[in-house]
Amino acid sequence: MSIRTLRPFLFVALIALFCVSMVAQDAPPAQEVPPPPAAPPNAVPQGTIFMIQLLDQLDTRIVKPGARFNARLAEPLVTGDGQTIDTGRKIKGHVSAVYPGFRTRMLLSFDEIETGRGWVPLIATVTGVPGEHGLRQIGEEGEIGRQGMTKEQIAEAIVVGAGRGAMEGERAGGKRGAAAGAGSGAADAAATAFESGHDLILEKGTALEIRLDRNLLVAPR
């Protein structure tokens, strides 16, 4: 291809590059997100992560939105000026929502905490359920859900259950028994998989990891 043939394409390319450079120059500079203001000296700073322990059982089979619960502080909190909220201080909260179904979830909200210098508002989010196999925090709002089986795990469980049922049925009743046993085994496996994510129970004493969403202010000394 000759230079004369390429000339129109080169001209268009140069114009495009010129336009891009002008747009880049005119575009406003990216704005940096300012850091949160420094916490007052008599506050436990926003973003602090700490452990609490439930003093009540929360069972999604019976608990309703609005139900109150109590917890205790499982580790001390210290303000910037050295005030300490001691381990064991009481915490009050409520159940904000319960989402029943195949993957049952529960959303907890916190109301206030005892500081030793009075009760103060506690605005925090659950970030984890350490030590509880199969439970996890879901999403940014702090919903707690059971780690149910994936679709692949359910399918595998049904196949394995059907195979075991077929073997037992064949020993008992030949081919007809094998077919019946396969169906029964698959049904049992499916029911087990469903129940693995259906009910959610937080026992008394369950540890929760939570994060402060606002500064936790303590009355000055």
Image (cartoon, rainbow, N blue to C red):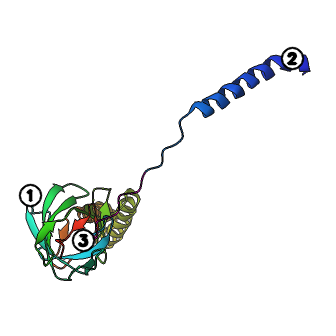
Q: Position of residue 169 (x, y in %)?
A: 30, 69
- Badge nearest the viewer, 3 or 1: 3
SS assignment at label 3: loop
Q: Position of residue 144 (x, y in %)?
A: 25, 63
Tell me whether the residue at label 3 lies in contact with that at label 1, contact meaning CB atoms closer than 8 angstroms.
Answer: no
- Magenta span contains residue 92: no
Q: Within the image, what quadrant is residue 151 found in?
A: bottom left
For label 2, count other residues whose C-alpha is less than 10 Å away and answer few (under 14), some (14-19) or many (20+).
Answer: few
SS assignment at label 1: loop
For label 3, count other residues whose C-alpha is less than 10 Å away and answer few (under 14), some (14-19) or many (20+).
Answer: some
Q: What residue does disc 2 label?
A: 5
Mark 3 vs mark 1: which is more N-terminal?
Answer: 3
Kindly identify the amino acid type of the residue bearing the numbered disc 1: Gly
User: Front-most of 207 and 197?
Assistant: 207
Vertical relation: 141 (above or below) 177: above
Q: Is residue 140 visible?
A: yes
User: Front-most of 20 and 156?
Assistant: 20
For label 1, count other residues whose C-alpha is less than 10 Å away and answer few (under 14), some (14-19) or many (20+).
Answer: some
Q: Within the image, what quadrant is residue 56 found in?
A: bottom left
Kindly identify the amino acid type of the residue bearing the numbered disc 2: Thr
Q: Residue at x 41, y 59 (%)?
A: 152
Q: Please give left or right for residue 198 compared with residue 17 in the image.
A: left
Kindly identify the amino acid type of the residue bearing the numbered disc 3: Asn
Q: Which residues are magenta?
A: 34-43
Q: Which secondary structure dominates the residues rendered in magenta? A: loop
Q: What residue does disc 3 label?
A: 42
- Badge nearest the viewer, 2 or 3: 3
Mark 2 vs mark 1: which is more N-terminal?
Answer: 2
Q: What residue does disc 1 label?
A: 66
